[in-house]
Image (cartoon, rainbow, N blue to C red):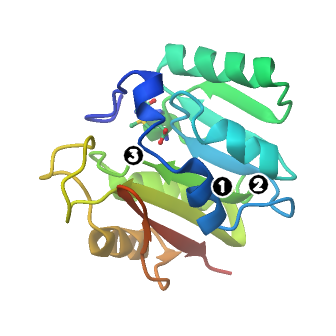
Amino acid sequence: MKLRESGMPAQDYWETLLDVTGILDAFGFGPATGDVAELGCGYGTFTLPLARRIGGNVHTFDIDQEMVVTTVRRAREAGIPNVQAELRDVLANGFGLSRGACDAALLFNILHAEEPVALLRAARDVVKPGGFVAVIHWRSDIVTPRGPSLDIRPRADQIQQWAEAAGLGADSPAILLPPWHFGISLRVRH
Ligand SMILES: C[S@@+](CC[C@H](N)C(=O)[O-])C[C@H]1O[C@@H](n2cnc3c(N)ncnc32)[C@H](O)[C@@H]1O
C-alpha cells in the first residue's frame, strides 16, 4: 500500500528543499559505512549522493515504478555502480534483505505513514546491532513550503516513542537540519 501523502512534487523543486550534503554529513555517512537500506528512493535525491560517499551498496525500494526507473537512470548516467533500486511495497513485504545485513537504514520523509512502528521495526530488522536507523522529517514548529498535513506530521518526541516501541534506542536528541527538517539517529541495540 502506498503510504498516505507520499506523492512527490516535480524533481527540480523537491531538490531545492533539502540540504542533502548537510543531512548526510549530520548522520556521519562516509567511506567506512557499509551497506545501507532506504525506504522510498523517490527521485534518488539521497540515494545517489549517499552511494557516492559510502563503501557499501545502497539497497533502495519504492512502490512507485516511475521513481525506481528515475533512480536507476540517474545512477547509470552518473556512473554510480553501488545502487540497487527495486520496486517493492516495504510496508507489506519488508525490505527483503537478510536480518542485520546493513550498517544503517534511511526513513526519510516517510514516518507520517499509517503504521510508523511497523516501518521502524522493518528498518531495525535489516540493520546490524550497533548500527542505526536515520530518520528525517519536516518540522512542524515552523511554516514549511512542503510536507504532509500538520495533523499527521510526526514530531521528534513521537518518533522517539515509536522507536522505543520498535525496539530501537531513542537516546540521542533530535537535530535541526536546515532549512526545513529535523533528524534523529535511532540505535539498533546489541
Ligand atoms: C515523500 S517521498 C520521499 C522520497 C525520499 N525518501 C526523499 O526524501 O527524497 C516518499 C516515497 O516513498 C514511496 N512509498 C510510499 N509508500 C511506499 C511503500 N509502501 N513501499 C515503498 N515505497 C513507498 C513513495 O512512492 C515516494 O517515492
In this figure, which residue is indicated by the disc labeled 1? 126
Which residue occupies 74% across, 31% down?
84
Q: Looking at the picture, how far across and down is residue 41, in whole percent? A: 56, 34
* Label 2: how many Cα within 10 Å (few below 14, some 14–19, many 20+): some
Q: Which picture quadrant has residue 174? A: bottom left
Residue type beneath disc 2: Ala
Residue 59 appears anywhere in the view: no
Residue type beneath disc 1: Val
Which residue occupies 79% across, 43% down?
52
Label 3, secondary structure: give it.
loop
Q: Which picture quadrant has residue 190? A: bottom right
Of callouts 2 and 1, which one flags the residue occurring earlier in the amino acid sequence?
2
In this figure, which residue is indicated by the disc labeled 3? 110
Residue 60 appears anywhere in the view: yes
Is the residue marked 3 within 8 Å of ligand 1, measured from its CB?
yes
* Label 3: how many Cα within 10 Å (few below 14, some 14–19, many 20+): many
Q: Distance between the residues labelled 1 and 3?
A: 17 Å
Q: Looking at the picture, how far across and down is residue 87, in whole percent? A: 58, 22
In this figure, which residue is indicated by the disc labeled 2? 101
If the picture is divided into quarters, which one holds ligand 1? top left
Q: In this view, does 103 lie above or below 107?
A: below
* Label 1: how many Cα within 10 Å (few below 14, some 14–19, many 20+): many
73 or 154: nearer the viewer: 73
Which residue occupies 79% across, 24% down?
78
Q: Residue 90 carries which label?
A: none
